[in-house]
Image (tube, rainbow, N blue to C red):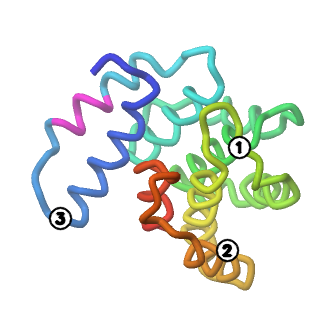
Amino acid sequence: MDNLHITPYVLRSLIDIQKYAKIDIQKNIDLAKAYLEQNQNTSDDIDRSQIVWALAKAKSTNIDRDFIVEKLKSKDLNITSRIFYTYALVEIDAKKYSQTIAESIEIIKKSNLDKSEYYRDSDSNNAIFISLLIDFWGNDDFVNTQIEEFYKKDLSSYYYSTQTKNNIFIS
């Protein structure tokens, strides 16, 4: 593996496969985790935020938590990275970072979630955000409304990427 863009997605997927399919792929998870730990200090915010979120999901102890909190305080942080960094804190310790997470969620909710950023599809971001909300505080009216919107989409269309479809199904 030598791609910092796709490896975080692969690591998160491997963790879900192992969890739900009960397949022992720990060696693959460990390899992806080690690669990301060695390369997590990339300068690109979106890639770094994806890496941090994947490492948090993999229960890595090699994550600079203060860095995440500082990034979330930034007013200039793009929404995609904000979603990933916030989800990382949920994975790391939702109770300890609950205030920071709640503040970041409010910023995300007030943003234009229908706008695509860089290579990120807005539907994919929305789906990840909904999963974050469910993992942080469960269902509420906002979550249920967003999920109902997902049901209205024709996911058999070639318009939606596989990654977007997976994120919607997971949410």
Checking the image for residue 6, the label placed there is none
Question: Neighbour class for label 2 at 10 Å: few (<14), some, many (≥20)?
Answer: some
Of tags 3 and 2, the one toward the viewer is 2
Measured Cα–Cα span from mark 2 to mark 1: 17 Å
Q: What residue is shown at x 50% (from left), y 64% (from top)? A: 168
Badge 3: how crowded within 10 Å, few (<14), some, or many (20+)? few
Q: Say which element carries label 2.
A: helix
Residue under numbered circle 1: 116
Q: Quick check: can you spot residue 142? A: yes
Looking at the image, do the residues carrying marks 3 and 2 touch, with CB atoms under 8 Å apart? no
Please state the horizontal and vertical placement of residue 79, each as a whole percent of the image: 75, 43
Query: Mark 2, mark 1: which one is toward the viewer?
Result: 1
Closer to the camera, 42 or 165?
165
The tag earlier along the polypeptide, 3 or 1, is: 3
Say which of marks 3 and 1 sits in front: 1
Residue 146: assigned label? 2
Q: Position of residue 112 (x, y in %)?
A: 83, 53
* Residue at horizontal 38 percent and vertical 20 percent from the top: 3
- Up-down relation of residue 101 to residue 33 (above or below): below
Q: Tell whether position 75 is magenta.
A: no
* Circle 2: residue type: Gln
Quadrant where the image shows the N terminus: top left
Secondary structure category for the residue under label 1: loop
